[in-house]
Image (tube, helix red, strand yellow):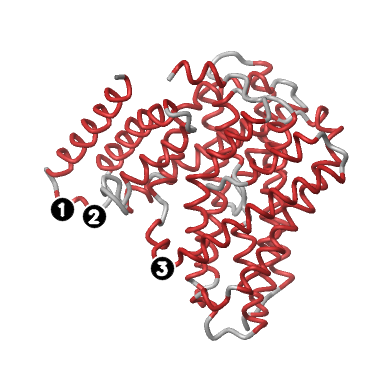
């Protein structure tokens, strides 16, 4: 009965939103402040209840958020149009920063020291190894890829390099969301979160290097020195900014009790907007900030409490907007190569993690289940896919391929990761979560 009530609420909110927008049909195709607020409000309410409906069937709530976003987005009902999505980037950026702050605050480097060998092995074998595997797969399926037509072997290799790295990106945001939802704690949850944080840094570096090589192989004027300078600024500047913000936040949390939530939100805006305008990576900035608060300031618990208070609306809006931005239409003409890459990526991560765990002497449970935490995709993969299309207009449809892979992994991978945490015996709040819904 509760599920029917939730469904009725979603339908009622949808009809009301459509009715309000019908008063000004000419505004449907353009962005207006009222329209943005209306769209964001609808997505927030509808996604929240759809998430609870999904949870009632034992599925991750964030999958429900994504589904609600897809239905509301431009590719379906159009309650949230492209102009609204563009204006919601600020909210989305702040959400990414808050999630990254929480991810950084979750990682106690002292407790990870015994896992250093395991994390290094997973990074090298599973992350880098899978990127190499995907390059080979892309070259093998060249006849299925429109952007490979007319390219020589050198050009095809360049295109495969940047596409493979973009496809291999993971999502700390999804790992944090599923981990928090299930209350998971243990070797699998900890190693999965630490791995995806490290993997994001590795993927960003690999993409910068692959882009430089691809420009030269595709016949462009690849300035290696300039590319390395930009890479050094993006990584080094982001880390430095994160350290400075982390010090300021740790000091504030230790000395001041009032206005903590507003201060954290202000830092999230700084990381998301000002950092981006300075060509820094907001994800790295926020991750480093959280790491400093946890490991230097030793007040990560206070930051996690603040982020936890805001986690429900932040997660709902972030994943719903991500769902609305998915380009499911590309699956119609790229279905086969997308499916091949999804499978190859999963095989690389799962097999690579298992091999890395065995070589590092980790418990069998780590090798069997940690790799599922590498499967989900969201913000970084979408950003790299779009960047690929803008940076290499001659292989623009490679961007569609990446976004198609992201669409599949964004929908199904969280389900597999939740299942893995349950099978590993680490989803301690699973019974409570199901009872709640």
Q: Quadrant of the N terminus?
A: top left
In three-dimensional space, the C-alpha distance between marks 2 and 3, rounded to whole angstroms, equals 26 Å
* Above or below, comparing residue 356 to residue 256 in the picture: below
> Which residue position holds label 3?
333
Q: Which class describes the residues within 10 Å of circle 2: few (<14), some (14-19), or many (20+)?
A: few
Q: Nearer the viewer, mark 1 or mark 3?
A: 3
Task: Please give the name of the residue rendered at 82% of the width and 46% of the height, measured from the top-left corner.
Answer: 120
Which label was assigned to residue 29?
2
Q: Residue 157: percent from the left, percent from the top?
A: 66, 76
Mark 1 and mark 3 lie on one chain; the one further toward the N terminus is 1
For residue 274, which quarter of the picture?
A: top right
Does the CB distance between marks 1 and 2 fall below 8 Å? yes
Q: First in sequence: mark 2 or mark 3? A: 2
Is 11 left or right of 292, judged from the image as shown?
left
Q: Residues within 10 Å of mark 1 (few under 14, many from 20)?
A: few
Q: Give the percent coordinates (x, y) of residue 25.
A: 14, 50
Q: In which quarter of the view is residue 65 placed?
A: top left
- Label 3 neighbourhood size at 10 Å, few (<14), some (14-19), many (20+)? few
Q: Looking at the rendering, in which quadrant would you find the C terminus?
A: top left
Q: Residue furthest left?
A: 23
Please give the name of the residue rendered at 47% of the width and 32% of the height, measured from the top-left corner.
59
The residues bearing labels 1 and 2 have C-alpha atoms spaced at a distance of 7 Å
Image position, residue 266 (x, y; %): 52, 32
Asked which secondary structure carries label 2, the reply is: helix
In this view, the residue in front, 154 or 36, is 154
Position of 180 with respect to 227 (left or right) is left
Which residue occupies the foreground of this view, 363 or 135? Answer: 363
Q: CA distance from mark 1 to mark 3?
A: 32 Å
Residue linked to disc 1: 26
Rendering coords of residue 228 (x, y %): 73, 64
């Amino acid at each position: 009965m509760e599920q029917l009530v939730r469904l009725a609420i979603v339908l009622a909110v949808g009809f009301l939103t459509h009715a309000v927008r019908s008063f000004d049909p000419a505004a449907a195709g353009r962005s207006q402040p009222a329209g943005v607020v209306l769209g964001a409000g609808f997505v927030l309410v509808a996604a929240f209840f759809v998430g609870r409906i999904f949870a009632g069937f034992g599925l991750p709530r964030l999958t429900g958020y994504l589904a609600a976003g897809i239905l509301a987005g431009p590719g379906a009902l159009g309650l949230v149009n492209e102009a609204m999505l563009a204006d919601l980037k600020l909210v989305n950026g702040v959400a990414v920063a808050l999630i990254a702050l929480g991810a950084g605050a979750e990682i106690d480097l002292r407790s990870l020291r015994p896992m250093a060998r395991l994390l290094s092995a997973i990074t090298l074998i599973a992350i880098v190894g899978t990127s190499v595997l995907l390059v080979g797969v892309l070259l093998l399926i060249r006849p299925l890829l429109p952007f490979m037509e007319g390219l020589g072997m050198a050009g095809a290799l360049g295109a495969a390099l940047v596409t493979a790295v973009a496809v291999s990106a993971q999502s700390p945001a999804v790992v944090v969301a599923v981990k928090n939802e299930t209350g998971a704690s243990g070797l699998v949850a900890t190693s999965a979160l630490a791995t995806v944080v490290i993997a994001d840094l590795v993927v960003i570096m690999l993409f910068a290097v692959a882009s430089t090589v691809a420009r030269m192989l595709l016949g462009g004027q690849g300035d290696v020195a300039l590319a390395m300078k930009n890479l050094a600024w993006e990584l080094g500047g982001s880390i430095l900014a994160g350290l400075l913000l982390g010090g300021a936040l740790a000091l504030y949390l230790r000395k001041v009790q009032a206005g903590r939530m507003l201060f954290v939100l202000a830092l999230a805006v700084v990381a998301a907007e000002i950092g981006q305008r300075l060509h820094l990576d907001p994800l790295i900035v926020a991750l480093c900030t959280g790491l400093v608060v946890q490991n230097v300031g030793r007040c990560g618990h206070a930051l996690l409490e603040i982020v936890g208070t805001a986690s429900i609306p932040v997660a709902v809006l972030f994943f719903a907007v991500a769902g609305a931005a998915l380009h499911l239409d590309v699956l119609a003409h790229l279905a086969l190569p997308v499916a091949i890459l999804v499978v190859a990526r999963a095989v690389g991560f799962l097999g690579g993690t298992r091999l890395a765990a065995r070589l590092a002497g980790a418990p069998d449970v780590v090798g069997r289940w940690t790799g599922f935490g590498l499967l989900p995709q969201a913000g970084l993969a979408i950003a790299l896919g779009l960047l690929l299309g803008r940076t290499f207009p001659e292989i623009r449809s490679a961007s569609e391929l990446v976004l198609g892979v992201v669409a599949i992994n964004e929908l199904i991978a969280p389900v597999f990761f939740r299942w893995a945490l349950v099978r590993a015996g680490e989803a301690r709040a699973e019974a409570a979560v199901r009872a709640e819904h």
